[in-house]
Amino acid sequence: MQKRLIMGALMLCPIIGVADTLPQHKEGVVEFCSTCHGVNGVSTLDHIPNLWGQSDQYLREQVENFRSKKRHTTFMDAFIYQITDEQIDTIVKHYSSVPDAMTFKLQWRGDKWPGDMQLGEKIAYSGKLEANVPSCVACHGPSGVGVKPGIPRLAGQNSAYLVNQMKSWKEGTRPAGAMAIMGPIAKSLSDEEIKAVSDYFASLGTPVAQKTAEVKK
């Protein structure tokens, strides 16, 4: 399954395989990143994260983790080693300052939104006491936007991306870093529970751009 996702990404995200095209000036780096993440931080690919709504601190930490090889993905490893401090500043300032879009709780109807919302909400608010898993909202907040800048926004994030990150923590392939608690949490949740809580947070809010696209369907 993971292999199919990677191969799909290689075809859908144009920057992969053309790392030597990374602009050497700060003005072009946002356009380069927007190929996959969107100029407004809203990704069109489920397995690539939305950057909209993330804080300056969180974005900077993640880019630095990729550049220092503490964190890896097929996509980022292809070019991140070339990025300069000035370009990081430009990227972080751009995506952390995208005008705030309306956030709202989506209405889940029938099979339009797959997943066990009841289970996801239970884990989000109550954790998994028998496994010493704390509630997600203790750090990410009831609205899923994070209670402080270093904690990532989950509301409106792509569910497939959230699932992949939880599995990376579960397998020990994503470094703990500032979020050291995530490894033990992920290892204490089943795949079903990970999917449910990921779907739940993805449902809490979404950029207007995504909602507009849904309305047009």
Image (spheres, rainbow, N blue to C red):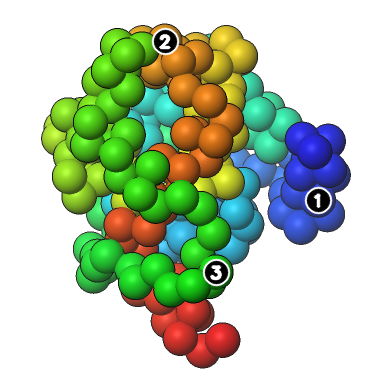
Query: Any mark on residue 184, and which?
Result: 2
Q: Where is residue 58 drawn, in percent x and y?
A: 32, 32
Amino acid of disc 1: Gly
The mark nearer the N terminus, 1 or 2, is: 1
Q: Residue at x 38, y 42 (%)?
A: 119
Q: Amino acid at mark 3?
A: Asp
Q: In the picture provided, is 1 more to the left or to the right than 158? A: right
Residue under circle 1? 8
Q: Secondary structure under badge 3? A: loop
Where is the C terminus found, in terms of image quarters? bottom right
Relative to 17, is 209 on the left or the right? left
Tell me if residue 20 can be seen.
no
Q: Which callout, 3 or 2, points to the residue nearer the camera?
A: 3
Q: Hey, which residue is sitting farthest bottom in the picture?
A: 216
Which residue is painted at 15% across and 35% down in the image? 147
Q: Is residue 157 left or right of residue 77?
A: left
Judge left or right: residue 3 versus residue 85.
right
Asked if the residue under mark 2 is in contact with the one under mark 1, i.e. CB atoms within 8 Å, the reply is no
Residue 152 place in picture, x, y as percent: 31, 36
